[in-house]
Image (cartoon, grey):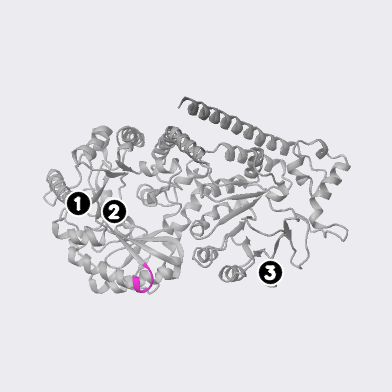
Amino acid sequence: MQDQIRWPLVILSAVLAEKLEQQPFVVIVRNQAEFRHWLSGPLPGVQWLQVEQLLRDPDVWAFASHGISQIPVDVILGDPASEFSDLYRLVDVCAVRDVRVSIPAAPGLFKAVKLATSLGLPIRILPGQPTAEVLGELSVILEFYLHGTMVEAPVEFFHSLLASACGAKSDSIWTIVEEDPAAFLHYDDQGNPRLPRSSRSPGNALRLAEFVESHFKSLVERGAECATCPWGGVCTGYFKWPDPSYSCAQVKQLLSRIAAAANEISRDLAGYESGFSQSETKE
Amino acid sequence: MSGRIFSVILLPTSECNVACDYCFEHKQPHRLSTTLIPLLTRRLLDHLENEGIEECEIYWQGGEAMIMGPGWFADAGNLMDRLAAERGRRFSHYLQTNLISYSPAWNDVIRGMFKNSLGTSMDYPNVHRKLFNGSASAYTALWTRRLQEAKAAGIKIGVIAVLHQGSLETGARKFYHYFTEELGLTEFQVNTPFPGGPAQQIEGGFQLDNGQLAAFLGELFDIWMSEGYRSGISLGPFDALVDHFTHRAARLPCIWKENCSNQFISVNSKGVVAQCDCWVTSYPEYFFGNLFQEPDLTRMLKTNRARRDFVERPKHLVEHEDCLSCRYLSICHGGCPVRTYSAKGTIMAKDPYCEVYKVVFARAENYGRQVLVNELPKLRKIAGEQKFAS
């Protein structure tokens, strides 16, 4: 969804979005009227609709499966454990527009990921600061993503981290999950820019574009484990926000497994290349 | 306009000219009048318009569709296509027939309306498809003659074979060679049976042992891969599964769709609407409504309680059955509602052939991997040529 967009991308409620014109933005829609309005007559700058609290409404998805505009939708699940089976409502929508599912790291996450992948839907996991229970699910999901032969659509944030470990363009987890205010500027319902996963106001002194850098710098200065963490470059303190005392031990295990998988892929590719060169030489 | 396609299994009659044991249909001497075609078409087009769908596939079945005669089809097809074109939509027509009353008089309409192809059915051995005099062998002889006549007229023919106990006892090799060598077919598919409607009264034959059935299908898959896959024989649903596992565009059969209720309905000659031909001919408790009596098909489909069961079924299965933990969920979604209903008396359960499907899926996955590995040298060659060119 992020190709050819000018940064930062503004993400704001439907009411506030009415005032925007050419600037690229994402509209958060939370009821049927907003959804219908923005799907039917999107302003030129709208990049996609962030759909919240509507997965259970069959009328919304029946409407979205009509060919009215091709605007993509990002469907946010509130509670994956109770909502996962409603993903079946998106089947017809996928035939007419791009659909992504964003799932908070909460109990039931694996169920939602399993069903979304079986429907071919790209997924964005919103990890936040996962509990031990959810880290268990993330571990199972990572295994499923890495080795499940039936998985075809990307499962973020794993997918971009794996690509980056394999040598592709590298983004931080903040950017991958679209929480870095320098690239994705979220506004609250009053129209104030807000910090990621926090109701706190950024304060006058802090420039949001420098939030991640300044947060990471402060962690390192305070002697947090980030200073020596091998994943500091891609994480930049993501898992230490908003609670800087969060222990990253299990998160690091997940990231290590991604790195190990990337190494495995690199070895396989090297083997393939060498076989390829040998067969070329023989010919 | 969306890229979705809507399909209608249209039964212009529930009359039939043969007397097969395992037919699930309640046959009635009723035919769709040409005077009702404009109304039927208008209702369908209204629905397409409401749903923003451009194309509608019409699968003409019966009863026996050919009972209506070629002239009737030519008139109905022309009228429907004209009305659709006037509203910026289009119909694609497909014909499924037992071929028993095929004659050269059909060739023009088959060429024009059905793109010179048709679907028919035959089993091996044939013990259940019978003429009214009760003879299966006479049925086979007559059907085979009609098949050869239609092939000689240049018509492309696909055959559906329903498996029964006799097929399993005969063995996969003989079964395969009957269709490919004795009949000279290049396109056929195997269906699993289900004891729906009147067929429920027939003892035995249709309740197959899942282990035996899985073994049969596994062997048939092996034979097709070794003898037919590379020589242009299309054997469904194996071909679609191999396409899927080799990352090609695959059209899996309706029994394995995410939700069949999203994609088609069936309408009979009286205007009754239900999920598919199996439901419209056998299970009144699951009728959605009547197209000739209710002015708005979209509303009927949206509000009918029976249809809501179909819509909700996949959701129910991932919540209450073990489908979510199955590695093949993405290509099955709990299987066929009518097979489930005929075996278990409810649609809110997974397909009784679940274990059979898993064997077939695993076979397809394995073969898909082999096909991809075998294609590596070819891919390397292409990569080499591209490297050289650049």
Q: CA distance from mark 1 to mark 3?
A: 61 Å
Instruction: Report the mark closest to the observer, 2 or 1.
Output: 1
Q: Quadrant of the C terminus of chain A?
A: top left
Q: Residue B86 in magenta?
A: yes
Q: Of residues A11 and A9, which is closer to you in this image?
A: A9
Q: Magenta segment range?
A: B85-89
The image shows residue B37, relative to residue B308, as above or below, that is: below
Residue B14 visible, this orientation: no
Q: Along the horizontal axis of the image, is A200 left or right of B270?
A: right
Residue with the mark numbered 2: B197
Q: Residue A56 in magenta?
A: no
Disc 3 packing (10 Å; few <14; some 14–19; many ≥20): many
Residue located at (72% from left, 43% from top): A131
Give the amino acid at mark 2: Gly
Q: Which mark is residue B154?
A: 1
Q: Main secondary structure of the magenta part?
A: loop
Q: Callout 1: helix, strand or loop?
A: loop
Q: Along the horizontal axis of the image, is A143 left or right of A196?
A: left
Instruction: Report the mark closest to the observer, 2 or 3.
Output: 3
Residue A116 in picture, x, y percent from top left? 55, 49
Q: Along the horizontal axis of the image, is B280 left or right of B263?
A: left
The image shows residue A248, relative to residue B196, as above or below, that is: above
